[in-house]
Image (cartoon, grey):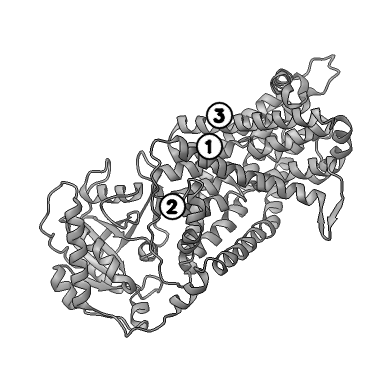
């Protein structure tokens, strides 16, 4: 029996991906469509009758007249226009049974493609519980296609779908040609959907539903925003608190592994490469994985529960004034833990202009990797002085650094809005789905997918650059009569002395210039790099901070410390962030543009800070 290519099509929040996960289980793979960053999920299954099915989960689409890259990919795959993607043999058009009035319009557009189609009424249990009555036989006769029901979150909820996949492929609908649908066709689809809904769907008598009561509070302009702030505060606390033990465990594991490998190999470049380069580099990548998974767990729960679109709606007007949209909220929120998942989360933004603007400003959010640097400099130069009650001067400075990043992001996005040719406001159009409990199985699958994406797409580049940095810090070795630390004679050390002239207007000395080089692997490496430079190699981060504090407070000026703090607000001192920008935009030019503008901001702001502080006598 030949393999059958089946495509799942449907609007966002219809349960399409849950159905895909239920049908394929672990027999699936995630990649990108060729040439774009739109996610491509494909899986396999074999029915009870032995039919082999290759299942493709198409990106969610509100319409086949595309307003986003996702919708354009779905349309082109269904029409056979997408390179390397054969036209499917069968479409499973998945709809939310509790919201058929909206979803049936997409059904009309899918039927216009002229492919064999089966309509899947998902979330049928929720519709029945809400008192919604659907005449499936009448709807099937009117559409001329099979109509089945499903509950994708239950083990026994997809039996009708599996039976239909075993049945003979239904006849194709009469094609309407290969030309794109015009406005009249959309109007016709809307009319057809209204007609089908009126004839075959009976809604319960008007009554206040739980969703309406929740929305009255959660979408309230004041109560809703306060609720969102509390939820976000809890999310941040969880990301920092819950991830710490796992991150410490990963660091300890790779540290022990490096020590073990180092003890088994003779001293020399090979041992240094493996222990200090490859193993330390891999640990430096994977140490962020717990934060990323915890953050994405929250995002997936918010998305699956139906709350995420409501948060975007609440913030749309505020963010629109700065040239962004409500959909930018979650990616920017994610960037406070790490810019990598934040940039990856911009895939949910349909408008390419808004998505790129969000990617550009995501690195300005104060990620957790900056905290070791901030802790070192604030502890060394800002006195512990109580301002009012539990509020102290050091805490205010740290808050000011966070606020400076947020404010700068809004200013940059506002300038981007004024600079670009297309200044039109793009209305936020999204569906507010019914509230529902997230499915644990789908959450685990989603977390596994995102972990693999992070490791495969970003890990390789970071690891390669870490090995390169190890080489720069190791070679050439010091001469026999060396009197300076070995790092002074390395390529990185020589470069640091040269860079001192470039960074002199910022007040950076040669030690800072050297530390900025390995700090490119990750921002927090700056602290351990300074420890190495000041002959403290081998100390852990906390010890390094305690030992460094009196040294830099004596040798650096306050103006230099403030300049370095401002530098870390803006500089893209993280190769993983730049690598993710390249991966997500599929463009070296855009990555270089982001790098140049961030370094320019950092250099200009740091220079102004140093020169003003120096003029005020803060030496």
Q: Could you give the CA–CA distance between mark 2 and mark 3, rounded to whole angstroms? A: 26 Å
Q: Residues within 10 Å of mark 1 (few under 14, many from 20)?
A: some
Image vertical order of residue 484 relative to residue 325, above or below? above
- Whether residue 287 sits left or right of residue 187 in the image: it is right
Q: Nearer the viewer, mark 1 or mark 2?
A: 2
Whether residues under marks 2 and 3 lie with C-beta atoms below 8 angstroms apart, the answer is no
x and y, in percent, of residue 392 in the image: 82, 53
The residue that mark 1 highlights is: 579
Residue at x-position 47% and y-position 64%: 310
Q: Residues within 10 Å of mark 3 (few under 14, many from 20)?
A: some
Image vertical order of residue 306 relative to residue 256, above or below? below
Q: Nearer the viewer, residue 541 or 573?
A: 573
Q: Is residue 321 visible?
A: yes
Figure quadrant of the C terminus: top right
Chain-order first, disc 2 or disc 3: 2
Chain-order first, disc 3 or disc 1: 1
Residue at x-position 66% and y-position 48%: 403
Q: Residues within 10 Å of mark 2 (few under 14, many from 20)?
A: some
Q: Which mark is residue 24?
A: none
Secondary structure state at the residue bearing disc 3: helix
Q: Which mark is residue 596?
A: 3
- Whether residue 497 sits left or right of residue 320 in the image: it is right
Q: Nearer the viewer, residue 547 or 595?
A: 595
Q: Could you give the CA–CA distance between mark 3 and mark 1, rounded to whole angstroms? A: 14 Å
x and y, in percent, of residue 252 in the image: 72, 49
Image vertical order of residue 309 relative to residue 31, above or below? below
Residue 240 lies in what quarter of the image? bottom right
Secondary structure state at the residue bearing disc 1: helix
x and y, in percent, of residue 286 in the image: 61, 47
The residue that mark 2 highlights is: 348
x and y, in percent, of residue 148 in the image: 25, 72
């Amino acid at each position: 029996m030949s393999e059958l290519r089946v495509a799942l099509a449907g609007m966002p929040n219809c349960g399409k991906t849950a159905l895909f996960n239920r049908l394929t289980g672990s027999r699936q793979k995630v990649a990108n469509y060729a040439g774009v960053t739109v996610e491509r999920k494909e899986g396999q299954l074999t029915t009870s009758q032995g039919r082999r099915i290759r299942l493709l989960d198409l990106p969610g689409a509100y319409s086949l007249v595309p307003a986003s890259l996702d919708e354009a990919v779905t349309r082109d795959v269904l029409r056979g226009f997408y390179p390397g993607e054969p036209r499917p043999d069968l479409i499973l058009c998945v709809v939310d049974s509790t919201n058929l009035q909206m979803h049936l319009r997409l059904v009309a557009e899918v039927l216009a493609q002229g492919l064999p189609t089966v309509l899947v009424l998902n979330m049928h249990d929720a519709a029945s519980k809400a008192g919604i009555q659907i005449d499936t036989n009448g709807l099937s006769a009117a559409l001329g296609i099979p109509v089945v029901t499903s509950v994708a979150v239950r083990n026994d909820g997809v039996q009708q779908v599996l039976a239909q996949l075993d049945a003979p492929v239904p006849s194709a609908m009469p094609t309407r040609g290969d030309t794109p649908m015009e406005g009249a066709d959309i109007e016709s689809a809307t009319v057809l959907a209204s007609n089908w809904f009126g004839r075959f769907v009976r809604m319960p008598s008007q009554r206040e539903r739980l969703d309406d009561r929740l929305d009255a509070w959660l979408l309230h302009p004041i109560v809703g925003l306060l609720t969102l702030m509390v939820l976000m505060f809890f999310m941040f606390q969880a990301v920092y608190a819950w991830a710490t033990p796992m991150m410490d465990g990963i660091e300890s594991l790779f540290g022990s592994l490096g020590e073990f490998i180092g003890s088994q190999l003779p001293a020399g470049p090979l041992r240094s490469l493996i222990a200090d380069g490859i193993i330390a580099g891999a640990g430096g990548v994977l140490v962020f994985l717990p934060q990323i998974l915890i953050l994405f767990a929250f995002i997936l729960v918010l998305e699956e529960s139906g709350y995420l679109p409501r948060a975007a709606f609440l913030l749309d007007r505020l963010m629109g004034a700065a040239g962004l949209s409500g959909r930018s909220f979650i990616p920017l929120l994610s960037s406070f833990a790490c810019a990598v998942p934040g940039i990856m989360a911009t895939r949910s933004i349909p408008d390419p202009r808004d998505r790129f603007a969000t990617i550009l400003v995501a690195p300005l959010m104060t990620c957790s990797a900056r905290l070791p640097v901030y802790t070192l400099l604030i502890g060394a130069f800002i006195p512990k002085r109580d301002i009012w009650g539990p509020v102290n001067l050091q805490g205010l400075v740290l808050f000011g650094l966070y606020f400076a990043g947020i404010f700068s992001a809004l200013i940059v996005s506002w300038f981007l809005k004024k600079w670009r040719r297309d200044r039109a406001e793009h209305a936020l159009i999204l569906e507010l789905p019914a509230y529902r409990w997230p499915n644990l199985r789908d959450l685990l699958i989603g977390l596994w997918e995102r972990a693999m994406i992070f490791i495969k797409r970003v890990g390789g580049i970071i690891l390669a650059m870490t090995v390169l940095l190890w080489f720069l810090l190791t070679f050439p070795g010091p001469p026999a009569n060396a009197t300076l630390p070995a790092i002074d004679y390395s390529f990185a050390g020589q470069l640091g002395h040269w860079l001192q002239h470039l960074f002199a207007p910022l007040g950076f000395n040669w030690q800072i210039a050297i530390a900025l080089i390995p700090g490119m692997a990750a921002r927090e490496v700056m602290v351990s790099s300074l420890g190495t430079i000041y002959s403290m190699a081998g100390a852990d981060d906390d010890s390094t901070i305690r030992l460094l504090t009196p040294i830099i407070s004596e040798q650096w000026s306050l103006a230099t410390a403030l300049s370095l703090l401002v530098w870390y607000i803006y500089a893209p001192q993280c190769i993983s962030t730049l690598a993710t920008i390249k991966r997500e935009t599929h463009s070296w030019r855009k990555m270089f543009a982001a790098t140049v503008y961030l370094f320019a901001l950092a250099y200009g702001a740091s220079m102004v800070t140093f020169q003003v502080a120096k003029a005020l006598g803060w030496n």
